[in-house]
Image (spheres, grey):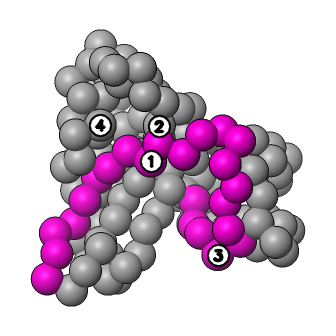
Amino acid sequence: MGIWARDVLNSSAFTLTSIESELDLICISPNELGFKDGAYRKDIYQQALDRGLTLCPLEVGPQLRLQYRNQPVRESLQIGMEPQVDSDGHVSEFRVVHSSTDGPLWLVGDHKHPDDFWKNDEYFIFVK
């Protein structure tokens, strides 16, 4: 687990619901949302919402990391969620990553600024 992810999980912002639920997640790229040349996060999120998708609850990132044990090497999935602030004031969202063949599976924070551009072949997770 990355430092940012650990900090957010240990913060008061991270609370688990006592009601177990099952979510239908979708993995989708900016390209699949109609952004052939990539897009900004706010535009990606808005297009996803316009298509009836919703942002993920905070616990989706850690839960997906625990359950997605056979993640392909070099796959990186950005969790479409409300950005969280860590104890140092860094804003980020969870990312589920498998970086290399002999490397571990990671839950990290992606510190991309809201004005940063996302390539059209990056993948986001939303709730269907």
- Label 2 neighbour load within 10 Å: few <14, some 14-19, many 20+: many
- Type of amino acid at the residue the image marks with label 2: Ser
Q: CA distance from mark 2 to mark 4?
A: 8 Å
Q: 32 or 85, which is in the foreground?
A: 85
- Label 3 neighbour load within 10 Å: few <14, some 14-19, many 20+: some
Circle 4 sits on which residue? 4
Q: CA distance from mark 1 to mark 4?
A: 9 Å
Which mark, by number, is residue 92? Answer: 2
- Type of amino acid at the residue the image marks with label 4: Trp
Q: CA distance from mark 2 to mark 1?
A: 5 Å
Can residue 16 be seen in this snapshot?
yes
Circle 3 sits on which residue? 121
Q: Earlier in the sequence, mark 1 or mark 4?
A: 4
Say whether marks 2 and 1 touch (CB < 8 Å).
yes
Q: Which residues are magenta?
A: 102-124
Total count of labels: 4
In the rendered image, residue 45, in percent from the top left (x then y), is placed at: 72, 46
At numbered mark 1, what does the secondary structure look like: helix, strand or loop?
A: strand
At numbered mark 4, what does the secondary structure look like: helix, strand or loop?
A: helix
Say whether marks 2 and 4 touch (CB < 8 Å).
yes
Q: Is residue 43 left or right of residue 122?
A: right
Q: Is residue 86 above or below residue 3?
A: above
Q: Is residue 117 left or right of residue 13?
A: right
Q: Is residue 68 above or below residue 25?
A: below
* Residue at figure coordinates x 33%, y 20% from the top left: 88
Which mark, by number, is residue 110? Answer: 1
* Residue at figure coordinates x 22%, y 40% from the top left: 3
